[in-house]
Image (tube, rainbow, N blue to C red):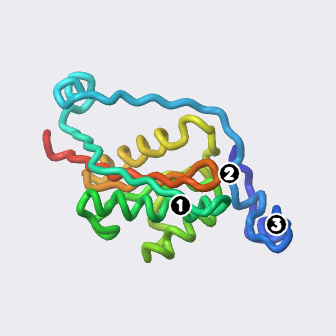
Amino acid sequence: GVTPTSAQGLARLEPVQEGGTVTFGSQTHPADGNCGMVLTGRERARELSRDPGIEVQLLSYGQSRAKRAFMPLAPVPAARQALEHAGLRIYDITAIKTHNPFAVNDVYFAREFDVAFEGFNNHGSSLIYGHPQGPTGMRLVIELIEELVDRGGGYGLFTGCAAGDTGAAVVVRVDTALK
């Protein structure tokens, strides 16, 4: 779970590999969890919804591979691909959610897209809540949708990574003006 710490405490941690930068303070902790999502058509979604005035659309996705063991780099080309397929730029995005098993994932993403990493994962992420292997991506997409609803709608970008070299991304649109 969440462990209290300080900048001084984190600075004292030894890197996992000699000469490296990843410590046990900059990676996720193991966690259990599960998640579920219903994918359906517009009419059935309205029947099941607590608020039929909210509509969520999956606009596009992207996927990529990086050099083996360079997994933190893989979500960036996947995100670029998803944004291109949606006809959007990073600055059109209202909320960004990333699966970040290591802090370096977000630092690299922020540098590549010229965005402040303090501006995404506003309601937590894998580094905060842990990284249950199966439901992590789906849980984060649901959190992204919830954040967009709270903001009154807009476009959201989720990025994820897996298996040491794989990246994925999806762009969603949430419309809350249907009420």
* Circle 2: residue type: Thr
Give SS at disc 1.
loop
Give the position of the N terminus as an image quadrant. top right
- The label nearer to you, 2 versus 1, is 1
User: Which residue corresponds to mark 1?
Assistant: 74
Q: Name the residue under label 3.
A: 15
> Is 178 in front, or is 112?
112
**Residue sitting at x 26%, y 57%:** 86
Of residues 70 and 57, which is closer to you in this image?
70
Q: Quadrant of the C terminus?
A: top left
59 lies above or below 15: above
Dot 2 falls on a residue whose secondary structure is: loop
- Residue of label 2: 28
Q: Is residue 77 above or below residue 53?
A: below
Label 2: few (<14), some (14–19) or many (≥20) C-alpha neighbours in 10 Å: many
Give the percent coordinates (x, y) of residue 116.
47, 73
Q: Which mark is residue 171?
A: none
Residue type, mark 3 in image: Pro
Relative image position of residue 33 (x, y in whole percent): 60, 32
